[in-house]
Image (cartoon, rainbow, N blue to C red):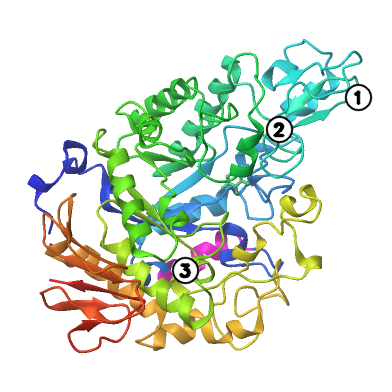
Amino acid sequence: MRRSSDLSPEQADESAWWHDAVFYQVYVRSFADSNGDGVGDLDGIRSRLGYLELLGVDALWLTPFYTSPMADHGYDVADPRDVDPLFGDLAAFDRLVAEAHEHNMKITVDLVPNHSSDRHEWFQAALLAAPGGPERNRYIFRDGRGFDGSQPPNNWTSIFGGPAWTRVADGQWYLHLFAPEQPDLNWDNPEVSADLARTLRFWLDRGVDGFRIDVAHGMAKPHGLPDMDVRAEQASGVLHDNALDPRFDDDGVHEHHRMIRKVIDSYPGRMAVGEIWVQGDDRFARYVRPDELHLGFNFRLVQAGFEAEQVRAAIEHSLAAVAPTGTPPTWTLSNHDVVRHVTRYGGGALGAQRARAMALVQLALPGVVYLYNGEELGLPNVELPDWALQDPTWVRSGHTDRGRDGCRVPLPWEGSAPPFGFSSGQGSWLPQPDEWAGLTAERQLEDPDSMLSLYRQALELRKSTEGMSGTELEWYGAPPGCFAFRRKGGGLICALNTSGAPVPLPPGEVLLSSGPMDGDQLPPDTAVWLV
Ligand code: NOJ
């Protein structure tokens, strides 16, 4: 049990259930399909709540399931207050919330405030309206440059490749930082924030416990839409550098987060986490000030290689970023936008061994952990054939960037052939590799040495071990390529060896290790918990 003296005032507040929670990201399309169409859905998630309870997670984050033409698999929202028929309906959502709560799991949902779908009724009205009218003012329409307006209004590029502007029939251009089917909303227009407040209340009233805010460093755009520095483009998709790139992290965005916080504060015990790809701990900290978001996603562990010095720097940065605000840090190794970490760490048996080690590092840290569905099964990225690729990045990049489909392949649940219990139908929206027969949840539940068994043990110990108390770390001296930290409050030690040779273990009794120990030595590519 944690001692309340180890916790900050917010953490000591019982209603702040998220302060050391383990969230599980459900990429809805790929988790479980209840109706045989090859696409995951809300009833599918409900049918697997027993598994999630057994795994031991506290809360789910559901990726967008709202009405959408699916140009970006749901991150193009045509109606933010309804469920797309592909995923179910509002009654299915209500059933899921009720049953998750019976299983003691919180439900958090994704909000997409930076842009809508081009099929949203607002955008359809904007297209029909004349330039300069109120319908266009909900989006960012501008005249083009050049004597005939045939050049885009500025040099901004889309995150998915190509220009961030598309021209409409009457000659004006509209801004889309992502796909053309995702026009950016104009957050200077009060109608836009009033509509988000309505959406927040809609889902809060249906019982959701929190939100993940998509592109939380977007929304506000700088006055005059100045050009970006072309060097920023090479950094596209990674931590955003404010000095080069005015597309994101404009100071005006914080007013919108204060509005979001005000609405959420009127529903006790609810929270929001922002997707914040910014460089600079100081810029990050601004999003988690007491009147803004409760948590910010931190992507530093995603960006660190399997190398002790890099991982330690990522941890120290993440802790430093939130220290001035007193909000808990968050930890993520994978999500639906990045290459799965088994593959990032080298793939195959080595990648899996390292992923096991990093699971123990991540789960030994103070604060909030976000797991991505399938990481508990040790799923690697999948090399998909060209014909299977669906991510808009593939087409937008002129078939040079294969996009994110490889980390979104549906989960293997049971059996020996695709679709491995994912669907009662014949297939799945992205093909699963035959080799996943060895990685099904069914197989791994029976095997005490599986990745799934490691996650289950680690999650159980994270909850029950006194050694996990406290919010601070102290670092021990360690050989090159290794580190060891101790949870200051409870005393648990976590040691990681990324060097090529075994190293002596720090003193203590082994509670859990990511692989076999070598006497009193910690083998390469292994992590251990000691008390
Ligand atoms: C971030 C989401 O995680 C990603 O999947 C999506 O494509 C973009 N935001 C645009 O909404």
Camera-nearest residue between 50 and 473: 473
Left or right: residue 457 versus residue 120 is: left
Q: Earlier in the sequence, mark 1 or mark 3?
A: 1
The verdict on residue 43 being magenta is yes
Q: Relative to 222, is 254 on the left or the right? A: left
Give the secondary structure at mark 1: loop
Residue occupying image coordinates x 20% and y 43%: 11
Q: Is residue 76 left or right of residue 357?
A: right
Q: Earlier in the sequence, mark 1 or mark 2?
A: 1
The three-letter amino acid code for the residue at tag 3 is Glu
**Quadrant of res 455:** bottom left
Residue 216 or residue 353, whichever sits in front: 353
Return the x and y of residue 177 as percentages of the image width and height.
67, 35
State if disc 3 and disc 1 touch (CB < 8 Å). no
Characterize the local packing of mark 3: few (<14), some (14-19) or many (20 or more) Cα atoms within 10 angstroms: many
Whole-percent x and y of residue 105? 36, 57
Q: Residue at x 16, y 66 (%)?
A: 465
Count up the numbered dots.
Answer: 3
Instruction: Give the alpha-carbon distance from disc 1 to disc 3, as whole Å.
Output: 46 Å
- Cα gap from disc 1 to disc 2, whole angstroms: 17 Å
Q: Which mark is residue 176?
A: 2
The residue wearing badge 1 is 169
Whole-number angstrom distance, CA of label 2 to CA of label 3: 32 Å
The residue where tag 3 is placed is: 375
Quadrant containing the C terminus in the rendered view: bottom left
Residue 518 seen from this side: yes
- Name the kind of residue labelled 1 in the image: Ala
Q: Secondary structure at mark 3?
A: helix
Q: Which disc number belongs to residue 274?
A: none
Q: Residue at x 67, y 48 (%)?
A: 84
User: What's the amino acid at mark 2?
Assistant: His
Q: Which of the two labelled residues, at mark 2 and mark 3, occupies the earlier sequence position?
A: 2
